[in-house]
Image (cartoon, coloured by chain):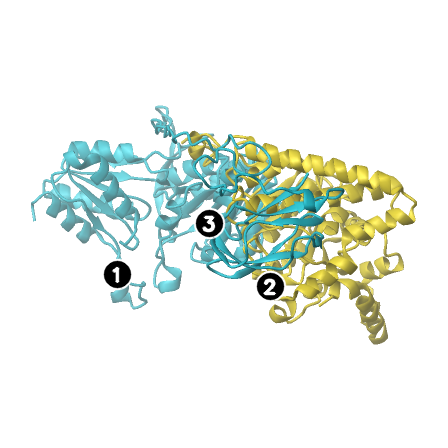
Amino acid sequence: MPIELKMPALSPTMEEGTLAKWMVKEGDTVSAGDVLAEIETDKATMEFESIDEGTVGKILVAEGTEEVKVGTVIAILAGEDEDASDIEAPADEAPAASDEADDVPGEGKDVGRDGNPLDIDKPEAKPRAKDPEIPEGTNMVKLTVREALRDAMAEEMRLDDRIFVMGEEVAEYQGAYKVTQGLLDEFGPKRVIDTPITEYGFAGIGTGAAMGGLRPVVEFMTFNFAMQAIDHIINSAAKTNYMSGGQMRCPVVFRGPNGAASRVGAQHSQNYGPWYASVPGLIVIAPYDASDAKGLLKAAIRSDDPVVFLENELVYGQNFEVAQLDDHVLPIGKARIMREGNDVTIVSYSIAVGVALEAADELAEQGIEAEVIDLRTLRPLDTATILESLAKTNRVVIAEEGWPTCSIASEVIAVCMEEGFDHLDAPVLRVCNEDVPLPYAANLEKLALIDKDRVVAACKKVTYTD
Amino acid sequence: MAKASTGSEKSKQAAANQHASGSSDSEDFALRTLQETLEEKQRFEASEEQLMHFYEQMLLIRRFEEKAGQLYGLGLIGGFCHLYIGQEAVAIGLQSALDNDRDSVITGYRDHGHMLAYGIDPKVIMAELTGRAAGISKGKGGSMHMFSTEHKFYGGHGIVGAQVSLGGGLAFAHKYNEDGGLCLAYFGDGAANQGQVYETMNMAALWNLPIVFVVENNQYAMGTAVKRSSAETEFYRRGTAFRIPGMDVNGMDVLEVRQAAEIAFAHVREGNGPVLMECNTYRYRGHSMSDPAKYRTREEVQDQREHNDPIERVKKDLADADIAEEKLKEIDKGIRATVSEAADFAESSPEPEAGELYTDVLVGEY
């Protein structure tokens, strides 16, 4: 059968081109790889190679022709055992891209792109699960966040052999911030692994191990260093399930301290919450107190999805009450109301929850009852809890230890505007760090970071009491 | 250039030089022992049946890729599409030596050939290229992002070099699970200059991971020739800093690749840690479909096709083994039919349902 040679698309965007020059003439024998013609696109001149063997029968588009549509038959090739001189030009030389081309010129009849309008049913967000009840009479113990995180890992590691912890100084040094203290003793070097200082590499190895069926907990000494590894967190861990049509699992937890520490300067002081929370395919958790840190880290380790778990160095040593329960796992994606109030809602997460609670105390002394919401999970965001509170208080302030631009605060404001506009009695305000790299000098650092006074001032502004 | 044709000669010379200096005699620093083993016997002794199978698989890749090129030209395949034509012997030589019940494979974006080498149905691969629901990634991955967990094929990764660290993780899992498997991690001469490759080599050697790093040196990183991008162009030497033994293999000869695979896999399975294998090969087509090919001459490509083609080499081996040409013609015919059927399927099966937009983002419900 004669082979139709069609004007090829030579780039992802090419729709037409110039047939600059024929390198063969009618009657020539060609074999695979021979250049048939030179074709000019808007970007370059490209050689059009023969894929088949045969004899050039008819040339249908003369050289020098401009605006030749992709798919136009430009020549006919006679195959083996055919007489090139017998070949007739096809009656219809119309380019393939015409409206009637329901059968795009490949081999099969293209019924796959019949042009049905895209009828998308966006899945509705399901109501979030509630925190499991703590039975009456449960013994409450004081734990630091550091201990709570360690207990979460240890409890999960006892239940599932596939879980291991890797990172810089997690084993023999017992953790740069002592979060992994004691794990090496209990679980041994097979499951508690010191890595070299090589974030990109071990983030990739952790991600690959998760793809291979393990459940790694990858500690970054701080999330500032994870910037070297962010490619694996986003491109490898977050996207692969989707790109594989749901075949590839990647149940990895990336955890470590995030946000400003104390007097460590700009490169060691950054909140990556908004960065990761913008990425579909990731779960992002940023707890405040010890109970949430424990219950949510357990949930993160059990999740079949990749989780970024953002801790805070300045909170590690703080004591909180934790219920002494065997297996207290908290739901991912559910915010927690830390304090109820009717006058203004303060939305917060991580270390800023402490600031918000202090502000609420001071506001209460002035007769303003603030409701404080700890988001706990940044992705998926519990918008329902925010909006319910907004409907009650009609005023929202966001307290965030991080930069204001493209922040979680920005996102919460957008949600309030889009879905809670009718309930708003004042503009939503954000209280964030100053929009500068974090300075070292003690006085400047203090000026750059959020504090109680700024949150109080914002709340008074939206309640028109300033 | 033309390293592919002279690779083994050069390596012999290198071996001789090393012997002269005595550096390979150190008992605990056996970086060249695998290469020396290969040089003792360079080509795998394939049975007629194996030889025919290699021919068939390589030809399938070639015809499949030619068809993919054609469909791209017709606008049925979009975006980037990197063809494997010229490099067929690498995937076939290596993957034919795997133990598919336990070993894993990972590669970059030039991944069609590695999937076909597994015997994965060409239809679902082609349908992925055309972005259809029946594609192996439901049409949501495309040419560069294809996976088959059933075959322990872990992609199909679009970020140059990322698959090397991920492969380190797969090898880590093999060791952790004590399943006796190894990971075959392919990357190109371009990826060989990425930092994470060396981060991974360091940890793989440090932790004795069961991994074979394979540099498919097709001489060009996109349009940049190896000598313009790499201070050390002998990539098999690049594991030296991590005490990883290197092998310099003619990637245009499926029997040499297979032989090298036997040696490397045995070494890894015995618990000796990683191997770095450089397969010198040549890509006939552009880096991707939109490559104007101004960085090399037509003659250079033609020279490789005529004198170094991996499929022609097997054909010659088959002739030497007195296999009737008729038999090969039958194979050719069958493959053309298979590929044409795959193309028909890829064109005629429907695009994904609109609702697929929202599936597979997360596994859990939160």
Percent x, y for residue A216? 55, 43
* Residue placed under numbered mark 3 in the picture: A15
Is label 3 on the same chain as label 2?
no
Which one is in front, A209 or B63?
B63
Amino acid marked by disc 1: Ala
Amino acid marked by disc 3: Glu
Amino acid marked by disc 2: Asn
Chain in yellow in the render: B
Which one is in front, A189 or B234?
B234
Q: Is residue B185 left or right of residue A271?
A: right
- Which element is circle 3 on? loop
Residue at position x 30%, y 54% in the image: A402
* Residue placed under numbered mark 1 in the picture: A448
Give the Cα separation between the discs numbered 2 and 1: 40 Å
Colour seen for chain A: cyan
User: Mark 1 belongs to which subunit?
Assistant: A
Q: Is residue B297 above or below residue A290?
A: below
* Residue placed under numbered mark 2 in the picture: B193
Is label 3 on the same chain as label 1?
yes
